[in-house]
Amino acid sequence: MAIKNLLVLTVFLSVLGVSVAIPKGLDLNYYKHRCPDAEAIVRRVTVQYVSRQTSLAAALLRVYFHDCFVRGCDGSVLLKSPNKDAERDAIPNLSLRGYEVVDAAKSALEKKCPGVVSCADVLALVARDAVLVINGPWWPVPLGRRDGRISRKSEVNLPSPFAGIAALKKNFFDKGLNTKDLVVLSGAHTIGISNCGLINSRIYNFTGKGDFDPSMNPSYVRTLKKRCKPTDFRTTVEMDPGSVKKFDSHYFNIVSQKKGLFTSDSTLLDDPETKRYIDTQVATAGSSFNKDFSESMVKLGFVEILTGNKGEIRRKCAFVN
């Protein structure tokens, strides 16, 4: 169910000057009485892990995004299957990492408040706090999500790094998110790391004639070819060269220079609204990016959620009860 179809309370949260409607069943103080230290416990565990390995911030943000885009933000991406047919077994999810942070936070919560805090909420909080550890923006996380009991590899249909703007907009619209959310959330690539395997065809054989994607800056292609040989599928590549360890608006500068690593990055210049946003962030040194990112992350956290009596509260995030 898209966000626009959710029943919403006449309650609004202020996200650095913007208002977002909270879906029925969620509350900023949801665990106030049953587990008042829930957010502090999750934050402590997240800080312990991410401060030691800052690349986990991007990894955990990616896990959250992949969860919310399949069956909504219900923690279904965390589930394991003995038959290897769960969401985490799908090809786009094989490179996900950071599960241990969610598991550690959940374990700490179970010791303090057994059977109270959902894995879906834990993941939402971990993603927020991980970004905060690397000095990224903070956003409020209304809580009360329930955990899904279904996780199917066959249902994983995520926005593709090879997709054009029309397909990406449809992916986001189908989840109740708009064009601005698309370009803003793409800004998370400022801390993203990929690998040569996902770009080799783009820089070596884009149309099957030994050419590169003409939408790419030729100098950037030469730089990428020095790092990625034609048969190299493993070497890592920064998605925001020179700024990958800092959560900032520099990604939009890179895209505007036709140095987007994926087709899904470059194609943001093909739509008037997304291009206008990029141009604005470049011209103003990202003056509104943190605020915009916070708002879009709040909206992402409302996608197809389970509340009330739906779903369950898992005891362990990798397994249904």
Image (spheres, grey):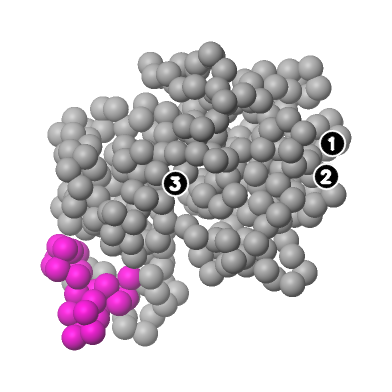
Q: Which residue is mark 2?
A: 315
Give the alpha-carbon distance from disc 3 to disc 1, as whole Å.
32 Å
Name the outermost residue toward the top. Answer: 10
Where in the figure is residue 197, as x and y percent of width and height?
A: 40, 74
Closer to the chain start, of discs 3 and 1, is: 1
Residue 76 position (above or below residue 300): below
Res. 38 image quadrant? top right
Residue 41 position (above or below residue 223): above
Closer to the chain start, of discs 1 and 2, is: 1
Q: Which residue is mark 1?
A: 115
Q: Residue at point 77% right, 69% down?
A: 82
Q: Which mark is residue 174?
A: 3
- Residue 71 in the magenta stretch? The answer is no
Where in the figure is residue 236, as x and y percent of width and height?
A: 41, 67
Give the side of residue 30 with respect to residue 174, left or right: right
Q: Residue at point 54% right, 34% down?
A: 302
Say which of 319 and 114 sits in front. Answer: 319
Magenta range is 199-221
Q: Secondary structure at mark 1?
A: loop
